[in-house]
Image: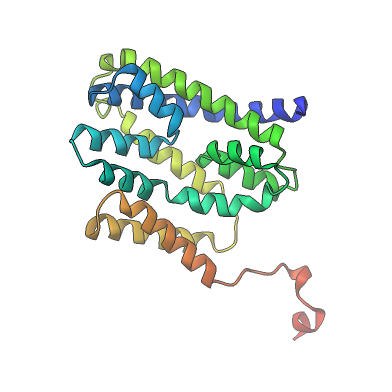
Amino acid sequence: MDRDEFRDGVRGGFPIMVAASPFGALFGALAVDNGFTIADAVFMSAMVYAGASQMVGIELFGNNVQPWLVVLSVFAVNFRHVLYSASIARNIRHFTPVQKFFAFFLLIDPQYAESERRAERGLPVSFSWYLGFGLIIYFPWLITTAIGAVFGQLIGDPRVIGIDVLLPIYFLGLVLGFRKRDRFLPVVAASAGASVLAMHFVGSPWHVSIGALAGVLLAACLPLERPASDIPAVEREA
């Protein structure tokens, strides 16, 4: 374990932890409101550890939906993690099997985004850095879930004070972090358009996965832009 790398990961994950704390508290409050105990809420945060799908899950639990439909709905929301793991695999191929187990468990949206950006800058995605970044988000997530479960009823309706808009703003910030990549605008437009259409014609939570797949398919079909240095002199002079 490289302590310097671990501390670097902790420093990088700290702002994410601060930003994610309201979501943890909000989940705890909603979980108790839907009939969970405080222990149930914390246990779900510890085992599932995926904010958006946790929100979907408790909503369905509260409506007495069949268990298989709950599992299927959570899978639909979390399908993007399959894409994340496929993308990040090339950066963590040096991890041991046990390290990969923990790496994929901690693989949430900001963990993926920052790992990709770190690799793009030419920095190594070491397990020490990855673990430091992940744990500084994971454990406070459990703590804020418990706090929200205990004191959440004091908040009342989160829409009144605007807490419900934090999640879309948070994801928008993650997306804009990749704005300098090739074909960013057409891929994002295709993903957003497909997600909106799916929301109207298919319904939630499937619009999340459908939008993601639309963006992936378009990105796979579009050619990558080549830097001028990679273009042969004969082609540049033509």
Q: Position of residue 79 (x, y in %)?
A: 42, 51
Q: Position of residue 102 (x, y in %)?
A: 59, 36
Q: Is residue 185 left or right of residue 51?
A: right
Q: Quadrant of residue 97?
A: top right
Residue 23: in sight, yes or no? no
Q: Is 19 drawn above or below residue 121 in the view shown?
A: above
Residue 235: in sight, yes or no? yes
Residue drawn at x 31%, y 29% is 162
Q: Quadrant of residue 228?
A: bottom right
Q: In the depicted view, which residue is nearer to us: 65 or 158?
A: 65
Quadrant, the C terminus: bottom right
Q: Position of residue 10 (x, y in %)?
A: 64, 26
Q: Is residue 174 left or right of residue 181?
A: left
Question: In the current view of this chain or complex, which residue is farthest to the bottom?
Answer: 238
Residue drawn at x 18%, y 36% is 64
Q: Is 63 drawn above or below residue 227 in the view shown?
A: above
Quadrant, the N terminus: top right
Residue drawn at x 75%, y 82% is 235
Q: Is 238 drawn above or below residue 107 in the view shown?
A: below
Q: Is 38 drawn above or below residue 31 in the view shown?
A: above
